[in-house]
Image: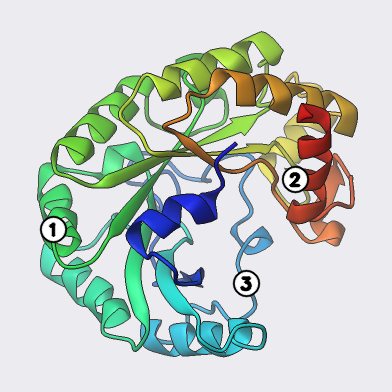
Amino acid sequence: MKSYSDYLDKFFPGVKVQKISVNAGFSCPNRDGTISSGGCSYCRNDSFSPSYCMQAASVSDQIEEGKNFFRRKYSDMKFIAYFQSYTNTHGRQIDALRKIYMEALDCEDVVGMAIGTRPDTLPDSVIALLAEINSLTPVFLEIGAETAHDTTLEAINRGHTWADVESAVGRAHSAGLHCGLHLIAGLPGENRERIIENVKAACRLPIETLKIHQLQILRQTPLLKDWQDGRLDVRPFSLEDYLDLCVEICKTVPDHIVIERFLSQSPPDMVVAPKWGLKNYQFRNLLEQRLK
């Protein structure tokens, strides 16, 4: 199983590279009323935002804080500016987007950029901007798809369709961007068979990377209330069942697509279920043992 570090080595041979998360103050179209409000029912953005990643700080200041954080271990590290929080192609004019992105890329030792976004906020003008930047430094586009089933997308208030995903990935790939997809395993009403269908559908698209993680039911989210009230069929994975699922996913994903991760780690006090208490490297070790 090829690792994500192996994938990055194609772009930055022999260099230790780390993503630095950036919060540039974006919102989401299903939060700010563009298409709906409330956001995705499972989402709590502060559950995955690092402590140095504060919207009040400038992009360059956040990157400097991130560099200081990671260089405690590796003094000669290079960095990818990772626009992670919310939808990082939404609600800004092209000139404003260019200014935000270039502020990050102008920081010392930043050698690339990763953009977390949604498929319905990638018009041709934004893809053209990202392709322009990609001609100067690698741009990794991370598109949140979550599932290939439109009924599930509607149930979790995503506000886009699988057809939107296919369109966005196709146009971005044609523009030369390095595309990855994000999927969540265990969304309402989705059993093991449906999850594998999602993986197969993703792998039919021209993507280079895939992020998959277990659904976490978090405090202060609409999903928690819907689950507790019995309005949605959500069945949190046991660790053993999820490991078995990940083995099947590894057998399903072709070799040319790199699986970047399998695990989501929110702060324990935010998580209602499942509560495994594992870090990414610990889960990966268990999975590698299972694969052997």
> Residue 223 appears in which quarter of the rendering?
top right
Instruction: Out of 204 and 129, give the one closest to the viewer.
Output: 204
Rendered position, 279 above or below 257: below
- Between discs 1 and 2, the one toward the N terminus: 1
In the rendered image, residue 224, in percent from the top left (x then y), is placed at 76, 39
Q: Residue at x 22, y 62 (%)?
A: 92
Which corner quadrant holds the C terminus?
A: top right
Name the residue beneath numbered marker 3: 50
Question: Furthest-top residue in view?
Answer: 193
Helix, strand or loop at label 2? It is helix
Name the residue beneath numbered marker 2: 284
- Between discs 2 and 3, the one toward the N terminus: 3
Residue 53 placement, left or right of 169: right
| Residue 187 visible in the displayed image | yes
In the rendered image, residue 158, in percent from the top left (x then y), is placed at 47, 34
Q: Amino acid at mark 3?
A: Pro
Instruction: Out of 209 and 168, give the one closest to the viewer.
Output: 209
Q: CA distance from mark 3 to mark 1?
A: 27 Å
Q: CA distance from mark 1 to mark 2?
A: 36 Å
| Residue 235 visible in the displayed image | no
What colouring does the structure picture have?
rainbow
Which corner quadrant holds the N terminus?
A: top right
> Residue 68 appears in which quarter of the rendering?
bottom right
Helix, strand or loop at label 1? It is helix
Q: Residue at x 35, y 34 (%)?
A: 207
Helix, strand or loop at label 3? It is loop
The reply to whether the C-beta atoms of the residues labelled 1 and 2 are less than 8 Å apart is no
Question: Furthest-front residue in view?
Answer: 14
Which is more foreground, mark 2 or mark 3?
A: 2
Name the residue beneath numbered marker 1: 129
- Between discs 3 and 1, the one toward the N terminus: 3
